[in-house]
Image (cartoon, rainbow, N blue to C red):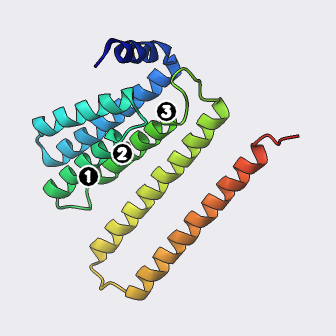
Amino acid sequence: MNETRLQEWIDELHETSSQQWGLRLVALMTSLGAMASVAAELGRSWPFGLLVVVVLAVASAIRPDNHTAAALICVIAWHWLATVDRIDTVWLPATTCCLLVYHSVIALTASFPVGGVVPVSTLLIWLRRTGLGACMTLFMWGLVVLLERREAAGSGVLTALALALAAAGAVLVRARSVDQIVATSPTDD
């Protein structure tokens, strides 16, 4: 790495606002929370995986606009799928909600310049949407656990209907979001 690039990188770190550092700390803590949830379910930790997650979390906190965040989510999801064979554990929604918050915070920090401050209205919108996603995650997990315990035969028609309703809900939320963005964006006069 040449001196100019190193100096640019150091300047960028100095320009990062305290709010941005706070958001990046939240991202780091939630990624570690996801690993802790998997470890709590297993009753043991995975030291190498923890090292990988820490390196990826720090890298994604420093550069939220690259692909290390996606790699971190894949590592944790793979670890869960490879080691845990239960859906009725409370550690599953804990892990997924940690990953949801991690992803949301990294996406938010990547959307603003390093020295920029995210407006409170934007933070509230992201918080509301992330909270809604977490609530839906908990609801779906509860529904899956309930159906699992019933031991009823599956229904292709009901599954297709549920997927259609979920897709329609996502389209509705997306359309409302776009309408809100268009309504609040300044117009060119």
Q: Between marks 3 and 2, how big is the CA–CA gap?
A: 15 Å
Task: In the rendered view, tell whether residue 75 sits above or below residue 66.
Answer: below
Q: How many marks?
A: 3
Residue at image coords 72%, 50%: 180
Q: Is residue 74 above or below residue 186?
A: below
Residue 44 percent across, percent down from the top left: 10, 41
* Residue 128: % across, % down: 58, 45
Asked if disc 3 and disc 2 are in contact, CB closer than 8 Å, the reply is no
Q: Is residue 93 left or right of residue 21?
A: left
Q: Are marks 2 and 1 in contact (CB under 8 Å)?
A: yes
Which residue is disc 1 drawn over?
77
Query: Disc 3 marks which amino acid?
Result: Thr
Residue 160 located left or right of residue 92: right
Assess disc 3: are there few (<14), some (14-19) or many (≥20) residues with their C-alpha within 10 Å of its C-alpha: many
Of circles 3 and 2, the one toward us is: 3
Residue behind mark 2: 99
- The amino acid at mark 2 is Leu
Q: Earlier in the sequence, mark 3 or mark 1?
A: 1
Q: CA distance from mark 3 to mark 1?
A: 22 Å
Q: Residue at x 16, y 39 (%)?
A: 49
First in residue order: circle 3 vs circle 2: 2
Decide: is 12 above or below 149.
Answer: above
Q: Residues within 10 Å of mark 2 (few under 14, many from 20)?
A: many
**Residue drawn at x 46%, y 50% as measured from the top left:** 134
